[in-house]
Image (cartoon, rainbow, N blue to C red):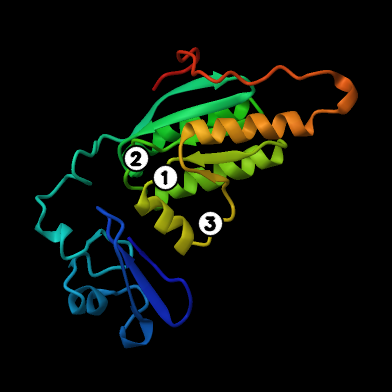
Amino acid sequence: MTVVPDDNLMTLICDVCGETTTGTACVLPDAEVVWTLVSDHGWSGSPFATGPHRCPRCSTLPPGPTAPGGDRAGGPRGMDRIGDVMVVATNGDLDADAGNALRTALRGAVDMGGTVVVDLARVQVIDPVGLGLLVRAHREVRDRGGRLCLAAPSRFIRTVLHTMKLDGVFPIYDDLDAALAELRAAARSDAPADAGSPAPLPTRRRPASSVTV
């Protein structure tokens, strides 16, 4: 994957580990052709900005795996309602292959209203398709007065979000428990003083009771 943070710099992101390298875009003959940047830094992959690309270390890995111990089969594992929060648990790569299943799961979570947390603990890589689905779901949740949060994003996903200036768009938490704890605290502080004590969000996850994909 390649991104262009501004008019002068172009950053390559390794699709396996999230390592980055940055070079001046002015040395490139075309904004969409990044072969000079790839070859000068010892990377491998596509000569085009859309990727894929691998850093020198990951270039020695056999084709296919996304990371040691990673699960390449991407898509949502299921949805849980935890109190007032819908949790979409995802798995593997969030890419074009997982796009339809992820789109369906996110739409279902958005339709149920409230806050949505996407658990990325078992995801290593996201491509423009997966990122676009998260951005669209964020807008739909926001328009309904809710929030879409990300839990446990990998280093690669954090790098992509930061480079695309989206790390300020999504509330990001180190893990699902941290996300639920902060959302519980926020729900208590937002409750009217004369409305009595609100029912706390549960601390344990319940088995998936809705759609599993």
**Mark 3 belongs to which amino acid?**
Leu
Q: Secondary structure at mark 2?
A: loop
Quarter of the rendering occupied by the N terminus = bottom left
Using the image, determine if residue 102 lies above or below residue 50. Answer: above
- Percent x, y for residue 185? 67, 32
Q: Residues within 10 Å of mark 3 (few under 14, many from 20)?
A: some
**Mark 2 belongs to which amino acid?**
Val
Which residue is painted at 37% across and 47% down in the image?
A: 154
Q: Compute the Cα span from label 2 to label 3.
A: 18 Å
Mark 1 or 3: the one toward you = 1
Q: Secondary structure at mark 3?
A: loop
Which residue is painted at 36% across and 52% down in the image?
A: 155
In the rendered structure, find residue 166 and report the number of the disc placed on it: 3
Res 93 → quadrant: top left
- Percent x, y for residue 18? 31, 57
**Is residue 72 shown to the viewer in this render?**
yes
Q: Compute the Cα span from label 1 to label 3.
A: 13 Å
Which residue is painted at 56% across and 26% down in the image?
A: 86
- Percent x, y for residue 67? 21, 46
Nearer-N-terminus badge (1/3):
1
> What residue would you read off at disc 1?
153
- Left or right, 90 with respect to 35, comes to right
What is the number of callouts on the image? 3
> What residue would you read off at disc 2?
123
